[in-house]
Image (cartoon, rainbow, N blue to C red):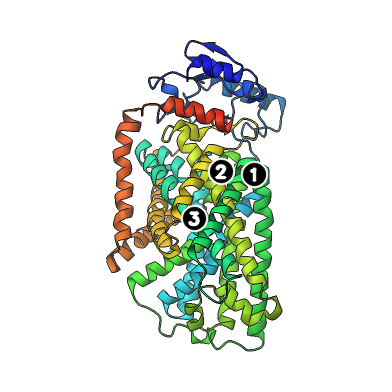
Amino acid sequence: MGARTIARLTGSETCDDHVIIQSSALFPERMVQHVTALPIGGAEQPHHSLFKDTGVSDSGTTTPTSNGDDGSRSRSNSDDATSSNPRNDGMERNVSTPNDALHLERRVGLVSGVALIVGTMIGSGIFVSPSTLLVKTKSPGLFLVIWAACGILSTLGALSYAELGTMITESGAEYAYYRHAFGSLPAFIFSWVCTLVLKPSQLAIICLAFAKYTVEAFVSECEPPIFIIQILCVAIIGLITFINCFSVKLATKVQNVFTAAKLVAIAIIIAGGLYMIGIGNTQYLSQGFEGSTTSFGDIATAFYSGLWAYDGWNNLNYVTEELKNPFVNLPRSIMIGIPLTTVCYVLVNVAYLAVLSPTEMMQSEAVAVTFGTRALGALAWLMPLAVCISCFGSANGTLFVGGRLCYVASREGHLVDVLSYVHIRRLTPSPALLFNSAVALMMIIPGDIASLIDFFSFTAWIFYGAAMLALIVMRFTKKDAPRPYKVPIIIPVIVLIISVYLVIGPIVDNPKIEYLYATLFILAGFFLYIPFVYYKKVLPGMSYITTFMQLLLEVAPSTAMAED
């Protein structure tokens, strides 16, 4: 398809090998404000290569070349916006101004930030993990200790991320921190693993749990057919993807509502458990540490299951550029959300043990449902509903942050260009969201939640540990960088040591083929980095694919938020 053909379709003018989109029924006038020249030429065009060439200035400001913008235009418009609003500190760019570069807007406040953390942490894990964790620990006492220890570890890690997020105010969390601390290669490897494995696997696990609990409510006589679970899982992923592509405001409202609903459900469980303790039902809790495991690998695997339930403590760092007043709201959201989740988890498990024996918990695949049947009587139906509500809210938040990582990595030239584009009216990173959902859909085919959790936990803690190392390294390499929030250096050191233990322990105690697959997958990123990022090789036809996807999805190139 040539330039003049595109021009006829869009009602635009042509200039050499570029199309300047003006206005048409397909692209509203807003497109004129944000899209400059769209290359329609062959693969020699640098704008639509497989990986675009971008640079990072000394201040960390991204200067993408995909849309021909050298950054000065965005900078000048930011100055205008700041001067017109005396309360605007350069970070608070809530709306795009006329002729401004297209970017995501700051629409996540303190309440939404807390809801994003709590809502993604409290997902399927508290309903799927208890039985697995108890199998490994073998005693109620060690079981509760590890639940509390997982909360403390998550809090320590999140406090370290608060320093990183307020020092480097870019979205992408670990991706941005690796890029500033270690350079482009580690950042690319993280984006490679996270966009193709970690974030999609999280979404797939949560949606599989949602589908499983939903189908079981209607099929009580036998095991539900796996294909029915998979079909429902596909439908839920599609619905959540639509919500996130349609509107950021809608996605955050859904997150807020579902987080509040799941907290109510957890309060019901805790109240039921405390009532049972009050009437003297403490025989299971009194067993204490009797029969506790002493296996190095079992304890590490138990931590895996518990930490899976806590995962999400770093999610707000993925959307820093969309967070209002991030220097205040990022650490504040962390300090509210994670302790709240830890208290909820410990009390919920105490409630379980006030009603169910350790053996009953280990044999149950739906601990919350079994608890509801025993303790809530006529209200037992609330537990399957609570599981579904919790999983849906967690899946919504998981896709919200997963799409942002894909978007940022693409904006920096580490993924295909079109994944960094933003919808011209809705200002959502719809291509990145659709890509993340597509990978998750492929992961639901096996239907095995346990193997996905093991694979996810092993690879995730490699990167969590590397983020702690990045913080330590930048204490020496970026001594003068402003740090609105700073943690004692011992905290990231402790988290780093525990991360190494969580990675090495299960491999030494019980080697599995999944660990080898994960390692090989990580190393494969190095062989892709050399040709496509370092040497900037281009796959033939990428310019045409990018243009087609841009026209189909009504998206345009974007830039990072100005930081001056």
Q: Residue at x 57, y 71 (%)?
A: 219
Which residue is outermost to the top? Answer: 16
Seen in the picture, residue 377 relative to 119 is either above or below; the reply is below
Q: Which mark is residue 128?
A: none
The C terminus lies in quadrant? top right
Q: Which residue is mark 1?
A: 108
Q: CA distance from mark 3 to mark 2?
A: 21 Å
In this view, the residue in front, 10 or 477, is: 10
Q: Quadrant of residue 491?
A: bottom left
Name the N-terminal-most of marks 1 and 3: 1
Locate residue 98 relative to residue 202 in the image: left or right. Answer: right
**Looking at the picture, how far across and down is residue 203, in whole percent?**
51, 54
Give amino acid for label 1: Val
Q: Which residue is mark 2?
A: 319
Name the N-terminal-most of marks 3 and 2: 3
Locate residue 443 relative to residue 95 in the image: left or right. Answer: left
Q: Which residue is mark 3?
A: 204
Residue 57 visible in this rendered orientation of the protein: no
Residue 191 visible in this rendered orientation of the protein: yes
Q: Residue at x 32, y 49 (%)?
A: 521
Give amino acid for label 2: Val
